Structures are given as structure tokens and as C-alpha cells.
Amino acid sequence: MKRQTLNAEKRKTIEGVFQSHWIEHSQFNKGLQEAKEEYNQMRPKMLQLCENIVRQYQPQQDVDTIRAMIKKYDSSGGELYHDNCFNFETDIINDEGERDKDTVRVDFSLDDNHGFARAYYRDELIKANCDPDFQVRWNEDNKRNPKYYEEENKCDTWLGFRSSSNEDKSIIKPKAEWERDKVWVIGSSYCHSRQFKVDQSTFEVFKMFNKVIGKVATQHEQLFNQVEEKMKKLRLGLKSYRFFDQAKQLADKLGIPLNESVLNESSSMALSVYSPENLASLLEDKVQPTREEKIAMAKQYLAQQNSLN
């Protein structure tokens, strides 16, 4: 039986199999999912706790009174703001043994934590052809790759931090969805101008909530670093492999399911895109392929040609 020869596209497909396996079985992927679940369980409780504290200092009847005054006198009637950001303080004894204040900020939006947003929606971003790992891949210590800004823009657009004129406005993006969780407060939109005093135990609960937010981002970073270290070594090895059975032998030693069908599936996908029916739909005047579609078509065309060589 003829040995299947590898080319760049087939090596890329094999890399994907190894990468998916390593991600799925990574302790940090498990940690990321657990951190997300912990956050999901805490979020509604923390929002309710924030609302209870705000209502202690700003009773609902006062909010209703100011709302009625605004309706009657416009901006002269007072100020109300629908907020998702809160600052809390508690009394402490500092390192010098003196009475002091400690503060904690609780934010239910995604605006100030893009890294958390990419970690939380990592799987969804990948399915949308975005790279949620770009900031970890090209960190501040290295000269940024031009793709850093391209991937940043794609992620920010999908998450809702940026928008374009031709996008479907009926789609609710994560940023807008998270901003629905708000509490009415008396005052302006400046979150830092409001400090609500709480006891030490409540203060610690809010700090724990923020630690969970940080844990989501940390697990994401550790997941990428662990898998990427393996991928660097794998890419070097695959470059030296000429035949599929060499990659298969490596996969077997590592307990990773790999068979030739994955290469055939890749080739058939390229052929299906260029079937008369699919290609015709892309070439109709009413359909203007996006930049991403054009790039995908070019890659699939190369894959098709390589599979025929």
C-alpha cells in the first residue's frame, strides 16, 4: 500500500488534531471551565447583594421621587444612573496600626476587562474564526506581530467592543448582553464618585468574586502556554516527517487518535466549497464574499491543489 506523503496543509491538519486533544485533556482547560462555572454561580448572587446594599443607602422611594422630579423638571429634578459598576469600602487597621479604609470595585460589565471576556468566550471566539489567544501569543515583552492588531479587532468586534456599519444590528453581542445587569443609583455616571460602606465579611465576599474573575483569565493564559509549548516541539517534528505513518506512530505513542480519514476530510471540504453549486452562489452579483471568505477560498484552493500533487 502506497505511503501517504505529507505537505504543508496536511501537516496543519495533523497539528489541529494534536492541539485539540491536548486542549481537551489539559488540567488548565478543566480549570478554565470550573472557573467559568464558579463565576456563573456567583454573578447573580453578587448582583443581588450589590442591589441590597445600594437600596440600604438609597431607598427605592427616593429613587422613585427623583424619577418623578426628573419627569417634571428634566435635569433640574436630580440625577439617576443605571449602573453596573460599584465601589465598596470597609474600615481596617493598616500596617502602621492606624485606622484606615480599604476599597474594592465590583464591575458586572465587560468594558474594563477584555482579557476576561476573551477567556470566558474562548470557545465561541474560535468557532467564529477569531483568535482569543492573541494577547498571550504576542505579549508585551515581544515585538508585536501585525496579526496582533488584526486579531484584536476581530475579537473586539465579535464581543461588541467595536462595531461596523454593515453588521446585523439585531444580533445582541456579549458586551450589550452583560450590560443588562444594572442597578439604579442616585447620582451621575461616575462610578468612582460613589462609595458604599460594608462590613468586613461582605467586603471579603466581593474580593473573592474578583479573584474568580482573575482566575478565569489566568487559567486561559496557562492553558495556552501549556499547549503552545507542546505545539512548538510538534511543528519542528512534523517538518521532518515526510509520510503520514510517521505522524501516526507519534500519535499512537502519545495516545492521540489519528487516522488518514482526517486528511481525506480536509480534502473533501476543499472540493465541496468549489462544487458548481457552492461556487456559483459565491459568484452571484448579490453575494459579495467577505475578506475572510476570500482568504478561506484561497487556502482551500491551495489545499485542493496540494492533495492532487
Image (cartoon, rainbow, N blue to C red):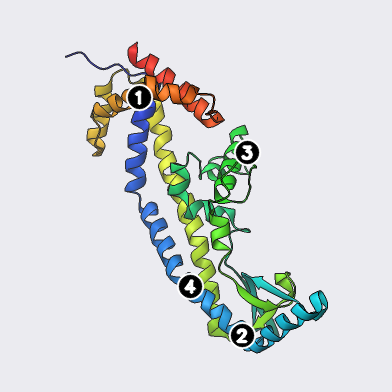
Q: CA distance from mark 4 to mark 1?
A: 46 Å
Nearest to N terminus: mark 3 or mark 4:
4
**Circle nearer the N terminus (4, 1):** 4
- Identify the image quadrant of the N terminus: top left
| Mark drawn on residue 55 | 2
The amino acid pointed to by label 4 is: Pro
Q: Nearer the viewer, mark 1 or mark 3?
A: 1
| Location of mark 4 (residue) | 44
Q: Amino acid at mark 1?
A: Ser
Q: Is residue 72 above or below residue 297?
A: below
Q: Residue drawn at (38%, 52%), measured in percent from left and top? A: 29
Tell me where residue 183 appears, x and y as whole percent. Answer: 61, 75
Badge 2 amino acid: Arg
Q: Tell whether label 4 touches label 3 (CB within 8 Å).
A: no
* Residue closer to the observer: 299 or 199: 299
Q: Residues within 10 Å of mark 3 (few under 14, many from 20)?
A: few
Which residue in the structure is indicated by mark 3?
A: 149
